[in-house]
Amino acid sequence: MTCDADLVTYLRSLPSVRETCQRVYALAKEDRLPHFRVDQDKIPQAADYVIEVIRESYPGNEAGVPFHSRWRHFETGNPERVPELTATWTCDAKEKARRLIDLALVSVLLDAGAGPTWKFKEPGTEDYYSRSEGLGIASFHMFVNGAFSSDPAAHPHRVDAEALIQLRSDAIAKAFQVDDSSNPLVGCAGRTDLLKRLGLSVKGHPEFFAGPVGSVARPGNLVDYLFALKNDKNEISITALWKAVIYGLQEIWPASRTQIAGQNMGDVWELSYLPASERAGKHVSFHKLSQWLTYSLMEPLQDAGLKITDLELMTGLPEYRNGGLLVDFGVLVPKTDNILTDAFDPSSEVIVEWRALTVALLDEIHKVILARLNLKADVFPLVKMLEGGSWKAGRVIAKSKRADGGPPITIQSDGTVF
């Protein structure tokens, strides 16, 4: 096997996600997995179901589906939330991008599954929001109120390292209207800890987050790092943004995660039945939250004038809506009954196998959809299928099968994976 340093570098790379998940899918095609069987005949049917969901939301305009990102959640119930905020700003285009990246980054890190009962009442309205939309809108209001700025009087719409590090332990609970008995939020304490670790990570990586001379350390300073790398066509590879995310934020992960050569690997797990002799060893990499973040950071960067290339290196997101669609539709068939009744830790091989197959099968569904719609991948990339799309279809089918709309497989979340 390769040396540990090379293994760390590989497992942090975007290609490793698709490649390690394909290893699991290859075993599935031979029915050699312990937990799931793949019904290949259901893949085209699942693709057709996703197309139906896309056409309900975007009739006659499949190519016009927006990217799957945090920005869609901010639009729920009021598409003008972000435009109304940015209209109050008098800053230049780069500072606008910095502020929007500040917002996107903290909001994405607060986006792990909320659980079936939590809800958020939007201030100034009678509207309640739940799940990802509720988390997005709640985090938006924290940002607007200056909760993430160390100088909220002068710079309210900023996220900086010092403010994150000093967050009170009950900051998320208060802002998200959490009550342990009447309005519980899954992994609430873990979310505050995650933001504190974000502050330490931003402070500890000036190569990405220092910004112009005299700046405070903040996530939005990624803008300056990336603009310095663009070519004469204003292009940067997605790998440049990925490097900043995967290395610049490596300290955010809980200490309990997979460690290789003293490095915390984040969303990387092991399957005991994979051969240790291959490049990745027994590891499977997902980087779901990091990819979701990368998708969400792309939009403000593009609006600021950057063109992002090599998007095909990104994968589908192995989370419970996409994975749930595959189970609920019968593409993935659990081999034992307890998979649908027990609760599993994210490190369990049931969950790792499920997530690996989700990444691989989203690629397969995407291929069918491109053929059905007669579109090329550069016009309808995977990130549009996720939005249109597979994530939404997973939610729709979950609601039709379970009263609480939850996933078919129960995950014991710590607020940092799902």
Image: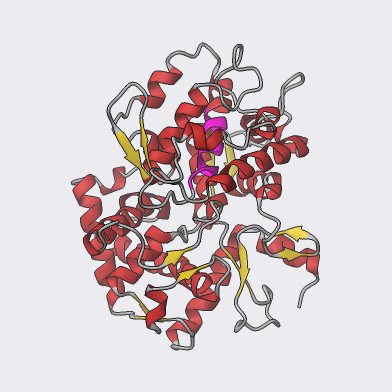
Say whether residue 200 is magenta.
Answer: no
Residue at image x 53%, y 31%?
103
Image quarter of residue 155: top right
Image quarter of residue 205: top right
Whole-percent x and y of residue 312?
49, 55
Dominant SS type (magenta): helix
In the image: residue 212, left or right of residue 219: right
Q: Which residues are magenta?
A: 100-111
Whole-percent x and y of residue 361?
41, 69
How many marks the image carries: the answer is 0
Q: Nearer the viewer, residue 388 or 131?
A: 131
Whole-percent x and y of residue 2?
77, 74
Say whether residue 108 is magenta.
Answer: yes
In the image: residue 287, left or right of residue 111: right
Res. 67 in view:
no
Residue at image x 61%, y 28%?
159
Quarter in which the N terminus is drawn: bottom right
Q: Nearer the viewer, residue 375 or 341?
A: 341
Whole-percent x and y of residue 62?
26, 48
In the image: residue 400, left or right of residue 112: left
Q: Is residue 85 above or below residue 261?
A: above
Residue at image x 33%, y 21%?
124
Residue at image x 62%, y 48%?
242
In the image: residue 399, left or right of residue 212: left
Res. 322 in view:
yes
Q: Is residue 44 above or below residue 127?
A: below
Q: How is the image coloured?
A: secondary structure
